[in-house]
Image: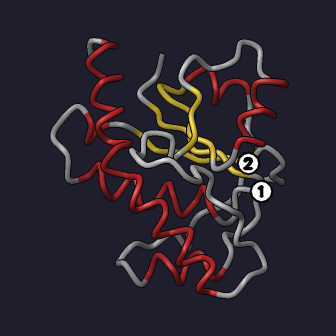
Amino acid sequence: MGATILIVCTANICRSPMAEGLLRHALAGQPEPLRSLDVVSAGVAARGGERVSENSVVALKKVGIDVAHHVSRPLTQQMLDEALIVLCMTESHRAMIRHQANPVPKHLYLFREFMPQRGNKEIPDPYGGPLRAYEASRDEMVEAIPTLIEKLKTLVAERGA
């Protein structure tokens, strides 16, 4: 099992690239072995080689993170097999992976799954929406990162890294 965190959305041009950039930035400030975890993203319905949406770039630039270089890629079984944890944006992404993957990843969660409050754990797709929709997605991701890092600490400890 690799030390990769795999983040999945639909086309890999809006939410998962933003989540990848945010989580990579957050992990850079953590002690080892968390700092060395690789963060990658892919899309369940992605075409390879597409540029990240402009509003995703702008929403992250506002918090000092550059994702302009990101290029979309489709989700593969190899990515799932190599991931320490797979994080989806919505239940539909998780359902699609459960339906198509063989084997299904053991650690398959929503990005906001570990948030303490009830309420919506999904991060809606801002695609085609105004910048504020992308900023709302970004803020929902940022809000989830502390609980996500706690989960990653547990997983890394279990793995005996």
Binning the other alpha carbons within 10 Å of mark 1 as few (below 14), some (14 to 19) or many (20 upward) gives many
Q: Which residue lies under the disc numbered 1?
A: 11
Q: Position of residue 118 (x, y in %)?
A: 50, 47
Contact between labelled residues 1 and 2, with CB atoms less than 8 Å apart? yes
Report which quarter residue 154 is drawn in: top left
Q: Position of residue 68 (x, y in %)?
A: 55, 74
Q: Which residue lies under the disc numbered 2?
A: 43
Please report the residue visible at 68 percent of the width from the left and 62 percent of the height from the top. Answer: 124
Please report the residue visible at 72 percent of the width from the left and 49 percent of the height from the top. Answer: 73
Q: Position of residue 18 (x, y in %)?
A: 53, 64
Binning the other alpha carbons within 10 Å of mark 2 as few (below 14), some (14 to 19) or many (20 upward) gives many
Query: Is 38 on the left or on the right of 29, as rendered?
Result: right
Residue 77 to residue 48: above or below: above
Closer to the N terminus: mark 2 or mark 1? 1
Please report the residue visible at 33 percent of the width from the left and 59 percent of the height from the top. Answer: 25
Looking at the rendered structure, the kind of residue marked 2 is: Gly
